[in-house]
Amino acid sequence: MSQLEILERDSWRDFLAAPTAVLMLGKTDCPACLAWTEELNQFLSDDERWQGTRFGKLELDRPGLGAFKKENPWISGLDDLPYTILYVAGEKKKEFLGGGIDRLINRMQRVFET
C-alpha cells in the first residue's frame, strides 16, 4: 500500500524527482482539501495497482515553503484548492482542480502508463 506523504521544506524536491508522483496542493483550513485528503487516504489504503507512484500533500499555508513557491510561481495564480498535479521524473505532466478518485485514476492511466 502507498500512503499520502505530508511534504515539507526538506522533502518536496526528492518527492517530485520520483519516477511518478501525484502532488496534492491544499491549505490547512480548506474543507475541500480535507475531504480530498480523506478520499486519497481511503483510496491508498486499498490500492495495490499504483505501488510505484508516490502520493504527497503540500499545505501551502505552512511555513518553510518559500523555495517551493519561488520555483513554482504559477502557484500564486491558483484561486481554488485542492489542486492535483501529476509529475513524471520531476516534470509536471497533468493537473486538475478539485478531487475525485475516478478523475485521478483516469489521468494516471493516461500519463503514467504511456
Image: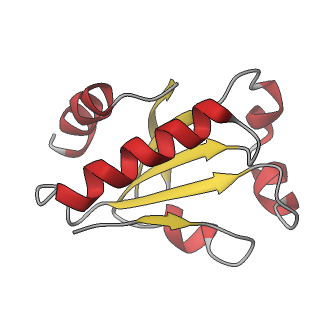
The residue under the point 18% across, 36% down is 109
The residue under the point 80% across, 39% down is 73
How did the renderer colour the structure? secondary structure
Question: Which quarter of the figure has residue 65?
Answer: bottom right
Q: Quick check: 10 left or right of 44? A: right
Q: Quick check: 43 left or right of 33? A: left
The image quadrant where one finds the N terminus is: bottom left
Query: In x, y percent, where is residue 94?
Result: 43, 32
**Count of labels in the image:** 0
In this rendered view, identify the residue nearer to me: 40 or 58.
40
In this rendered view, identify the residue nearer to me: 65 or 48.
48
Query: In x, y percent, where is residue 92?
Result: 50, 42
The residue under the point 82% across, 59% down is 62
Q: Residue furthest left?
A: 49
Q: Quick check: 63 left or right of 12? A: right
The image quadrant where one finds the C terminus is: top left
Q: Is residue 82 visible?
A: no
Query: In x, y percent, where is residue 3?
Result: 36, 66
Q: Is residue 10 visible?
A: yes
Q: Quick check: 57 left or right of 28? A: left
Question: Which quarter of the figure has residue 12?
Answer: bottom right
Q: Residue furthest bottom?
A: 10
Query: In x, y percent, where is residue 44?
Result: 28, 56
In the picture shown, does residue 38 fall above or below 45?
A: above
In the picture shown, does residue 32 fall above or below 90?
A: above
The residue under the point 83% across, 50% down is 61
In this rendered view, identify the residue nearer to me: 4 or 22.
4
